[in-house]
Image (tube, rainbow, N blue to C red):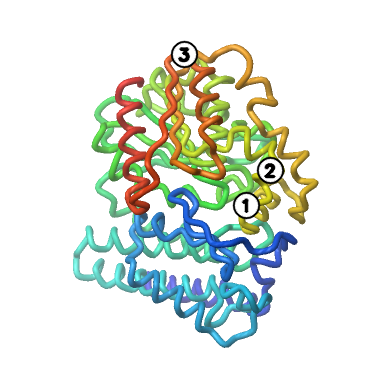
Amino acid sequence: MRETESENLSVKLFKPTKHAKETSTIVGTANDPLSDTDSVLDGNSHNSWYRVLRRPQWIWQGVEAIEMEETLARIAASDNTRSNDKLLDTVVGYRSGNWPYEWTQTGTSHQKKAQLKEEQGDKKGAFIDWLRASTCFSIAGYPHLKGDPLSQQTEILANKAFHFAMEKSPFKIKSVVTKVDGKSLEGFLYLPHTDEPLPTVIVSGSLDSLQTDLWHLFETYFAPANIAMLTLDMPSVGRSSAWKLTEDSSRLHQAMLHELETVPWVDHHRVGCLGVRFGANAAVRMAFVEQNRIKSCVSVGGILHAMLTDPQRLQHIPPMHLDTIASRMGKDSASFSLLTQLQALSLRHQGLLNGRKTKVPILALGLQGDPVCPESDNQLAALYSYGGKARTLPNKPIHDGYHRIMLEAIEWFTNTL
């Protein structure tokens, strides 16, 4: 029954979108493709791809390396029409070679494996394959730009697979819903157990990922440390798509923080926050505006000040990232006039990283040579927090970057929460 449901959903979702607008043309920044760059946090930016290829992250999330390369190879080898002949991942229409199409095919193969394992009574195997299906469907919609119909369809598949996975999880996962502007905001609370109220960390990723991508953090790092994790989408993406990104980047996080006070499994005297890239902008902001409720904070490669105020840095950002920022702010183009509006997002310009210190200890983590988060940003975050600390980790080996970062973060939360 479930297989037929899922297959029918795919057919129903993608049938009307054969001629859907191709992702790279949704915002269509005029920025020329850049030379190749490698980053643990952002992946590989190649001048022959529109999307930044997040190989280390996707493998870390459970995508098999060979399967990932096979999917990318099918996209690269396609003879179908592209919106930009120089960019491999711009095949137009939902068909072979199109990014959402190929990643949906990969996700569907895991969905079928999960269904087979369910029938065989292999609950753990089904759990793993439903999660892999969810991850592949999420990558199919990456970078999740507003107004991208194919991306919206893949998100429905990702959510469905995620819910099937959660039914089989060895952990407890609860939906936490609050209201902002009369609209529902949903986060997921992951609990190692429900025996007692637990220290909890609110976690957000970057602007181009979904909160369902973050489950691995809990399973590998938070659960063994006996810490609960609440995930939240950044404004204008996923379950937070009703709100734009503004200088008040932590607004949704604050609403969820207040909601947590009513959740019986959370020790609301021991709540921390962790963010990656723009998620770190919200996390560090929380450490200032909610310092009576937040106990500890970790910023990972945070976009706090420099990139938001330095035109030189913006010029070296891959077009996909510029498009994503413009999309989150509700703009339909990523022209460099965007810089003026970005400056308002700088926590220094907002008077937070140049005024009174926060009593919340902030650990600001970065990687050597990071073009987006220079050491100066991390030093600022550490300087303006009592007990704060800035750490720059080696950027090699690249596949080990996430692991090293998370070990540092968990040690920090264990000591400060």
Label 2 to label 3: alpha-carbon separation: 31 Å
Q: Residue furthest bottom?
A: 79
Disc 1: which residue = 317
Q: In this rendering, does residue 262 appear at all?
A: no
Q: Amino acid at mark 2?
A: Lys
Instruction: Mark 1: give few (<14), some (14-19) or many (20+) Cα within 10 Å.
Output: some
Residue at image location 29% in from the left, 59% down from the top: 128
Residue at left offset 51%, top offset 52%: 209
Q: Amino acid at mark 3?
A: Tyr
Mark 2 secondary-structure assignment: loop
The residue pinned by badge 2 equals: 244
Distance in Å between CA atoms under marks 3 and 1: 33 Å
Q: Is residue 332 left or right of residue 50?
A: right
Give, as a three-letter code, the residue at label 1. Ile
Q: Is residue 86 above or below residue 340?
A: below
**On residue 386, which mark appears?**
3
Q: Nearer the viewer, mark 3 or mark 1?
A: 1
- In-front residue for pair 261/362: 362
Instruction: Report the disc number at residue 408.
Output: none
Q: Position of residue 152 (x, y in %)?
A: 59, 62
